Amino acid sequence: MNGSREREGFSDRLQQALRNAHYQPDSPTKLAREFNIRFSGRAVTVHAARKWLVGEAIPTQEKLRTLAQWLGVPADWLRFGAGADALQDDAADNADGAPRFASDDVKLFADFQLLDDHHRQIAREFIRMLLRVGRKK
């Protein structure tokens, strides 16, 4: 497969995975923002995200793995299209069985990590209390 066709195929699969995960595949700004929330390396630019969406570039393997984990698809499918039959449109879990988190949840986890130890403990206790109250209903 030549480079141009590889990039176009990747772009198509990325857009499909974004739609399946209930994200709009036409906003490089949103793609960059959501990706950067989840990626621990150097942030990608909106320009780089646009290149992914229009088939001008394919991300590095590390970024590809982050995209696949976030969108709940196999990394090899996202990169090469392998195992496309196994991809389900409304998959609720990642390829490794871990649940996907909405961007609000990811932001909340990031905010939680900014708290000092005392306030993290308060937040944990509050969540446990809510779970106990919810179970009693």
Image (cartoon, grey):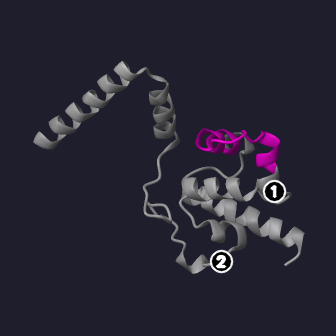
x and y percentages locating residue 10 in the rendered image:
74, 65
Q: Is residue 76 above or below residue 109?
A: below
Q: Which residue position is annotated with label 2?
A: 82
What is the magenta range? 31-50
Label 2 amino acid? Ala
Q: Give the residue drawn at x 79%, y 59%.
A: 58
Q: Which disc number belongs to residue 54?
A: 1
Query: How many marks can you see?
Result: 2
| The furthest residue to the front | 117
Label 1 amino acid? Val
In the image, residue 41 lies in the stretch drawn in magenta: yes
What is the secondary structure assignment of the residue under circle 1? helix
Tell me which numbered mark, 2 or 1, is placed earlier along the sequence. 1
Q: In the rendered image, which quarter is residue 112 located in?
A: top left
Q: Is residue 96 above or below residue 125?
A: below
Say which of 65 and 8 sits in front. 65
x and y percentages locating residue 56 in the rendered image:
86, 58
Q: Considering the image in quadrants, where does the N terminus appear?
A: bottom right
